[in-house]
Amino acid sequence: MRYILALLACSSLLGCAGNEPAPEPRFVPASLTINPANTEGICFSALTSARCDHDTRCGFVAAGKRFDDRDRCLNHYNSIGYQSLQGCSTPLDRRQLRQCLASIDSASCDAPLADIGTIEACHYGSLCRALP
C-alpha cells in the first residue's frame, strides 16, 4: 500500500511539473534592442565611441578644446559618418573591428583621429570582408 501511495504522489508531482508557467522573457531595454539588419550601425557606434574615448584621454574633449563635451564629440563623428565603410558589399569583419578598436585605443595623442582610415587595422580593406 505504501508503494502505491508513493507512486501516486510521484506521478501527481510529475504531472504538475508540466503546468508551471513559462519563465518571463529576459528584459532588454528598447535602446539595447539589436536589429540584425542594422549591425553596421552598431559597428559605427562602437567606432565613434572609441574615437571619443581616445580624444577624451588625449585632452581634446574639455571646455575650450576641440569638443566641449563628449556629446559634441559623438555628434561630430556621427555626423561625418563612415562613408568609406558604408560601401562595404559585405558585413564588417567583427574580429578585425575589435583590432581596429584596440588600435584606436592605443593611438598616439599627437592629433585627434580625424580619419580612422589612416590606422592600418581600421582601413577599408581591413574592415570590409572579402567575398569568397
Image (cartoon, helix red, strand yellow):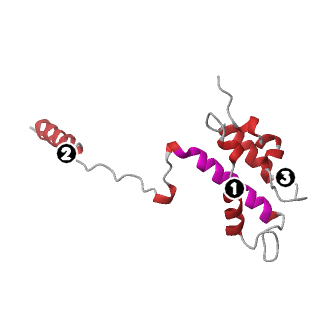
Residue at image mark 3:
107
For the residue pair 16 and 27, the one nearer the viewer reads as 27
User: Closest to the observer: 90 or 5?
Assistant: 90
Is the residue marked by circle 1 packed among few (<14), some (14-19), or many (20+) residues within 10 Å? Answer: many
The residue type indicated by label 3 comes to: Ala
Q: What residue type is labelled 1?
A: Thr
- Residue neighbourhood size for the residue with mark 3, other residues' Cα within 10 Å, grouped as few (<14), some (14–19), many (≥20): some
Mark whose residue sits in front, 1 or 3: 1
From this view, report whether residue 131 is shown above or below residue 25. above
Disc number for residue 121: none
Q: Distance between the residues labelled 1 and 3?
A: 14 Å
Read off the magenta span: 38-56
Asked whether residue 47 appears in the rendered view, the answer is yes
Element class at badge 3? loop
Q: Which residue is drawn at 71% across and 58% down?
A: 77
Does residue 103 appear left or right of residue 10 in this picture?
right
As drawn, is 128 to the left or to the right of 38? right
How far across and how far down the image is residue 104, in percent?
A: 78, 51
* Above or below 116: residue 14: above
Mark 2, mark 1: which one is toward the viewer?
1
Dot 3 or dot 2, earlier in sequence: 2
Asked whether residue 29 is in view, the answer is no
Mark 2: secondary structure: helix
* Residue under pointer 1: 48
Please name the residue that numbered disc 2 is placed on: 16
Residue at screen point 88% across, 59% down: 111
Q: Which residue is drawn at 20% across and 44% down?
A: 13
